Amino acid sequence: MSDEDRPGGMGRGLTHYGDAGFSLFLRKSFAKSMGLSDRDLARPVIGIANTASGFNNCHRTVPDLIAAVKRGVMYAGGLPVDFPTMSLGEPYLTPTSMLYRNLMAVDTEEMIRAQPMDAVVLVGGCDKTVPAQLMAAASAGLPAIVLVTGPMMTGSWRGERLGACTDCRRQWARYRAGELDEDEIDEVGGELSTTAGTCMVMGTASTMALMGEALGMMLPGGAAIPAVHADRLRLAERTGRRAVALAAERLTPDRIMTPAAFTNALRVLLACGGSTNGLVHMTAVAGRMGIRVDLAAFDRMSRETPVLVDLKPSGAHYMEDLHKAGGLATMLRELRPLLALDCLTVTGRTLGAELDAAPAPWPQEVVRPLDRPLTAEGGIAVLGGNLAPDSAIIKQAAASPALLSHEGRAVVFDSLADMAERIDDPALDVAAEDVLVLRNAGPKGAPGMPESGYIPIPRKLARSGVKDMVRISDARMSGTAFGAIVLHVCPEAAIGGPLALVRGGDRIRLDVAARRLDLLVDDRELARRRQAWSPPPPHPGAERGYLKLHLDHVEQADLGCDLDFLKPARTIGSTPV
Ligand code: FES
């Protein structure tokens, strides 16, 4: 049966009772119990992935957004049907939401495929939800459109503007250094997240929203509108309308998420000083389309892509300021000579056509012009060297420039527990010029690759005024964090990567300009250490359930940390192009 002939709406994918007529009769009969009529049931069905959860403050407005999407779907003649999927609220999940990103992607993909819908609206927002939904959309192959909850508004404390979560970390560091007392840090805690929405700095949620829009999977202007702004409800309504058209046009994600579109998204990641997690997530999404992210090409692109967006943690502003400055369109206008403008978007028009149709620019200070960037190179550099043979990354835009070329003595923590136990020990042998190493914190090692790469400055150094040190790990870092922090070291220590061989007192050299991270120990000694190495003991619970599936199949960070069996067998291209 060709795609054209396949039944749509409620007739899609019938339950297998061995009698198709009965299956449809039964489905409609049960659907009528919800008050729907035959006329309703004859319409194209638009599924709406509902990620509202009491454990996800970033998605507090999802019910309002779904109501607006439904309005749009009905105005356009469709039948909106929302359905629950997993929701991942970043601070509520242990050991880390990243462990569950792939599970959410599987849940979302299977529910899109198993239920009768002609197109789907994916309502996400918090860090891992948008990547999971894009991965699901890529694999499900149904017309899909992304709607994010949008960023929070900023708060203020004693005259100082605050936002989650760069200021959470900055103020917590001040508390650790003894600059704030208990009462003051409690007051700060009440002012960091003051409205519904996602973290309003250039953390992972903001980065993924901008990348999703640049990729073409969201309506233009959709990334930066604050969660509580009425424009977001209007956008939700338009998203619902457009979903009906997407279903009619059968505009599937494979026509939108092409190697050139991923190149645009990665360009935006670099130019917005975006989260390092954006690279891992987009690698996973591209992987679902059979597209490989070429890290050497990405690093070359980084050298020619300046950081334009002046947002925390690399800059000074917040997402609501970017929205007032015109949102992503203002940024794309500057990047125009570097973009693939003929990429199709969910609007059915190209990125270039949408950019032509965007409102004319106005004076603003959030997005710099191409000839006056925040930094000349992109926010993220890809490192090689004998400590990271398959790659590591550093968010150079958010690091202390003096530490980008540095050699120091290794102070090693074997695990997160070891770090928690010793980092603030007054007897810890550590100095400001040392290099802090955390290992066994990768996709298999932690497990789930938590955001623990932002190793705290040891308390005794923090109290003497040390603000930044070179820190290296196989973990990730929150997009809201900052510092001279090398992340995603591949292969990770838990599978025998060279990070496992570092000993306290070894010399390590970081040279970001040369893109190198080296352990200054000779090869014979490293070979001896490798002989003596044994893997860490198994995690509790590793013998069953989802954790077993994850440990048996998760890939390394340079491949996106997806489960290996979820990618298509065939690679169709690479990105950036
Ligand atoms: Fe949800 Fe930051 S906690 S986006």
Image: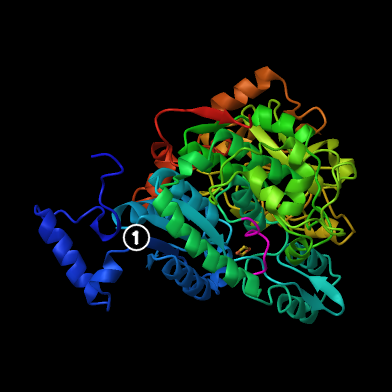
Quarter of the image with the C terminus is top right
Q: Nearer the viewer, residue 405 or 22?
A: 22
Q: Is residue 351 above or below residue 338?
A: below
Q: Magenta stretch: give its range.
A: 220-228
Q: Around disc 1, counting alpha carbons within 10 Å, would you say few (fewer than 14), some (14 to 19), or many (20 or more)?
A: many
Residue 485 appearing in the image: no
Furthest residue in direction top, as rendered: 524
Q: Residue 265 in magenta?
A: no
**Element class at badge 1:** loop
Give the residue pinned by disc 1.
44
Residue at the (73%, 47%) spot, across then down: 332
For residue 551, which quarter of the picture?
A: top left
Q: Is residue 134 above or below residue 88?
A: above
Q: Where residue 300 appears, x then y in whole percent?
A: 73, 29
Callout 1, which amino acid? Pro
Q: Residue 223 in magenta?
A: yes
Q: How many numbered discs, if any?
A: 1
Q: Where residue 403 appears, x then y in whole percent?
A: 85, 41
Residue at the (52%, 34%) spot, across then down: 495
Q: Where residue 127 appears, x then y in whole percent?
A: 58, 57
Q: How is the image coloured?
A: rainbow
Q: Is residue 241 above or below residue 444?
A: below
Q: Nearer the viewer, residue 515 or 442?
A: 515
- Ligand 1 image-quadrant field: bottom right
